[in-house]
Image (tube, rainbow, N blue to C red):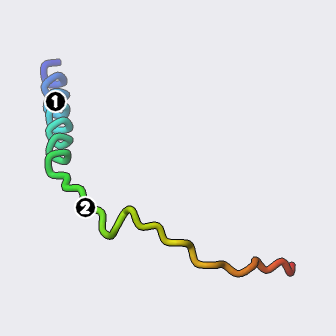
């Protein structure tokens, strides 16, 4: 019974520690380009309606 609690505690510590490690190592990328620039979409040809 003590082994079961010990195993659960080790697994919980490993999961929490791994989550904290991932959060601390996460380095979000800076957006590239001008985010305020809006470009129009290219014109599309009419869909082919011949079935």
Residue 39 position, x and y percent, is 49, 71
Name the image quarter holding residue 42.
bottom right
SS type, badge 2:
loop
Query: Above or below — where is 40 with respect to 4?
Result: below
Residue 43 position, x and y percent, is 63, 78
Q: Quadrant of the C terminus?
A: bottom right
Query: Above or below — where is 23 with respect to 34?
Result: above
Which of discs 1 and 2 lies nearer the camera? The answer is 2
Q: In which quarter of the image is the N terminus?
A: top left
Name the foreground residue: 47 vs 11: 47
What residue does disc 1 label? 7
Residue 17 position, x and y percent, is 14, 38
| Residue 10 located left or right of residue 39 | left
What residue does disc 2 label? 30
Q: Which residue lies furthest to the right in this view?
A: 51
Q: Which residue is drawn at 24% across and 56% down?
A: 28
SS type, badge 1:
helix
Name the image quarter holding residue 31.
bottom left
Query: Above or below — where is 39 with respect to 23?
Result: below
Name the image quarter holding residue 21.
top left
Q: How crowded is mark 2: few (under 14 residues within 10 Å), some or many (20 or more)?
A: few
Query: Above or below — where is 34 with respect to 19?
Result: below
Q: How crowded is mark 1: few (under 14 residues within 10 Å), some or many (20 or more)?
A: few
Circle nearer the N terminus (1, 2) = 1
Which disc, if any, is residue 32? Answer: none
Name the foreground residue: 48 vs 41: 41
């Amino acid at each position: 019974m003590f082994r079961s609690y010990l195993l659960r505690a080790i697994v919980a510590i490993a999961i929490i520690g791994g989550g904290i490690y991932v959060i601390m190592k996460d380095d979000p990328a800076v957006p590239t380009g001008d985010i305020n620039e809006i470009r129009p979409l290219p014109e599309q040809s009419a869909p082919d309606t011949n079935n």
